[in-house]
Image: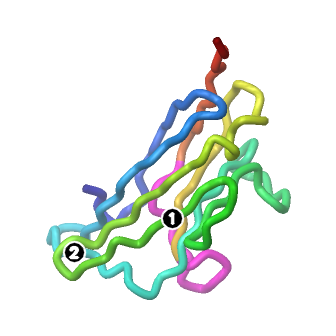
Amino acid sequence: MIDSAVLSWTLTMPAGSQLQRNFSFTVPGTGAPYVTTGLTWEYVARPTATDLTIPPLISVTTTPNSQGVITVLSTTATPQLLLTLNPAATVNIAPGQLWHTLWSGQSTSSAFTWVTGNLIIAGNPQP
């Protein structure tokens, strides 16, 4: 369960692997469900926290692409997001540390960072 304040999130994953993470959001202090309906969502990964290169190394929205998709599983009782990263998102990224963020309302006056931190891509020896 994630309180709706920016949280640090360090994620380590092997290059070229599949990943799914489920997020539930609540209102700070009350625990009431945070309404996610109608928000736009984007997950991005960049070389550093200040990099503004377009496009980012990884960019996933609610529109499926080869890198993955964000699925909004909102209900009134339990608003949730499911972030899916496909192998194509990281297969060509050299092992190392990136910076990643889950946004809502990106590029608007109501933009909000939900989680942000280090994305560590580990080597993934093949058989």
Give the residue displayed 65% in from the left and 34% down from the top: 16
Q: Residue 122, how many percent across, how many down?
A: 62, 23
Give the residue displayed 46% in from the left and 55% down from the top: 115
Query: Dot 2: what SS?
Result: loop
> Is 21 left or right of 42, judged from the image as shown?
left
Observer-nearest residue: 12 or 107? 12
Query: Dot 1: what SS?
Result: strand
Magenta-highlighted residues: 105-116
> Is 9 left or right of 107, judged from the image as shown?
left
For marks 2 and 1, give the CA distance. 19 Å
- The answer to whether residue 115 is above or below residue 74 is above
> Type of residue at label 2?
Pro
Check the picture and name the quadrant holding the N terminus: bottom left
> Which numbered tag is attached to residue 82?
none
> Type of residue at label 1?
Ile
- The answer to whether residue 77 is above or below residue 38 is above
The outermost residue toward the right is 53
> Which numbered tag is attached to residue 33?
2
**Residue position marked by numbered label 1 in the rendering:** 70
Tell me which numbered mark, 2 or 1, is placed earlier along the sequence: 2
Q: Residue 99, how many percent across, how many down?
A: 64, 44
Check the picture and name the quadrant holding the C terminus: top right
Picture quadrant where residue 80 is located: bottom left
Evaluate if marks 2 and 1 touch, with contact meaning CB atoms under 8 Å apart: no
